[in-house]
Structures are given as structure tokens and as C-alpha cells.
Amino acid sequence: MGNNPEEPTLTNLINNFNAIKKIKMPRLTILNLQLYAEHYVNEIIDFEVGDNAREEIRTHLSFPQKLRILKKMKILEEKQIKILELLNRIRDEMVHELVVNPDKITAKLKYTKFDFIYGWSAINKNGGKIGKIIDLKKAYKKVNDNFLKFFTSNILIIGILHNRLKIMKKLPVNEFIDLKFIEGNKNTNISLTVRKLNA
């Protein structure tokens, strides 16, 4: 099969998201997030199953079925699975429809909850514990843009998958997604960055 490409990084994920966000193309954002999510879902399942089952699972299980496996493995919670399932459904519409009805997508986002408790903690090189825990339910009350909440939650879930895969492979986890809520006159924006820890 040849050499595997270098593992995607959280920095690449955030950089891609920010670049696409600037050109205001939600279709590209959704396709990009789905590719990252599918990558990590497949990698985690591949790591857990034997060689004989790997190709069968990749070929014959749908993305939602793979997400159910991650739930059984206690890697994702039900809320997080529902968010990724919605990403998948919207991606399917965008791939199969030349002209996408934005009102239809907006309606789907309007009644969906994108909140969960997001947190990370680590020991820095000086032996001090650092980290962050955010209740997205409280934080999102200040954000009016449902697309922004949807994108942010998906990115955070991808970050969880990324770091869980590293832990499974017994690799150092030194990248974490940080988010900052920026208060504006009419709306609160969200800034996503990657916190890198020195080994």
C-alpha cells in the first residue's frame, strides 16, 4: 500500500477552517469538516479491529454506523454523535444537490443543540497542570449564529477524536483546541486556536 501520509494535525484543521471561513463558502467548510471527522472515525476503528475486519468495516458500514461503534467504545457521547450525524446529513445534501437551499439547512440548524461540556487538561513542561473546561450550553447563549455554533462544535469533536487516537496509539498528546468568545456590539464571535505544549 505504500507509506501512509503524515497524520493530519489540529493546526491544519483550524488553519483550513479559518481560510475557508474568510471566503464565506459554507459548502467547502462542511465538506472539509466531514473529511476530517471521517478520517479520525476510520482511524480509531481501524486501530481497534483486526486486519480481516478493517476493510469490511470501511467498505460496508455507513458513517452513522461507525459513530455508533465509537459510542459503544465510550469515545463519543450521544450529543456529540448527533452533531456529527447532522454534519453527515448536510454534507450528503451538499454533495448530491447542485443548488443547495440555504433555508432548508438553516431550519435544520435552528432546532439542533450543539452544546456539550468541552474540556482538556495536561501537564506542561514545568510540571504544572493547565487546561480549560467550557460549558458550551452557557457559552452559546451569547452566540446568535447557528452555523458558527455548528462548525465550532464539530471542530471540538474532531479535536477530541484526534487526541483520543493519539492516546490509543500511546503517542504524546501535545495539541489542544482552545476557544475564546469575543464579545461584539450585536453578537459574540468565536475564535479557535491550537494550544501546543512543549514536550
Image (cartoon, helix red, strand yellow):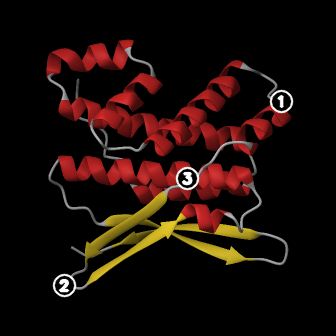
Dot placed on the residue nearer the N-terminal end, 1 or 2: 1
Q: Residues within 10 Å of mark 2 (few under 14, many from 20)?
A: few
Q: Nearer the viewer, residue 180 or 83?
A: 83
User: Which residue shows up at 43% across the image and 70% down it?
Assistant: 133
Dot placed on the residue nearer the N-terminal end, 3 or 2? 2
* Residue depicted at x 70% and y 68%: 189
Residue 114 horizontal/vertical position (percent): 60, 50
Asked whether, in this view, residue 78 is left or right of residue 40, the answer is right
Q: Quadrant of residue 32?
A: top right
Residue at left offset 69%, top offset 65%: 141
Q: Amino acid at mark 2?
A: Gly
**Neighbours of disc 3 within 10 Å: few (<14), some (14-19), many (20+):** many
Residue at disc 1, secondary structure: loop
Mark linked to residue 127: 2
- Which residue type carries mark 3? Ser
Residue where numbered disc 3 is placed: 153
Using the rendered view, name the quadrant where residue 115 is placed: bottom right
Q: How many marks?
A: 3
Q: CA distance from mark 1 to mark 2?
A: 52 Å
Q: Are marks 3 and 1 in contact (CB under 8 Å)?
A: no
Question: Label 1 amino acid?
Answer: Asn
Q: Position of residue 94 (x, y in %)?
A: 69, 27
For the residues marked 3 and 2, what is the alpha-carbon distance in whole angstroms? Answer: 30 Å
Q: Does 150 appear above or below 102?
A: below
The disc at residue 101 is 1
Does label 3 or label 1 sit earlier along the sequence? Answer: 1
Q: CA distance from mark 3 to mark 1?
A: 22 Å
Image quadrant in which the C terminus is located: bottom left
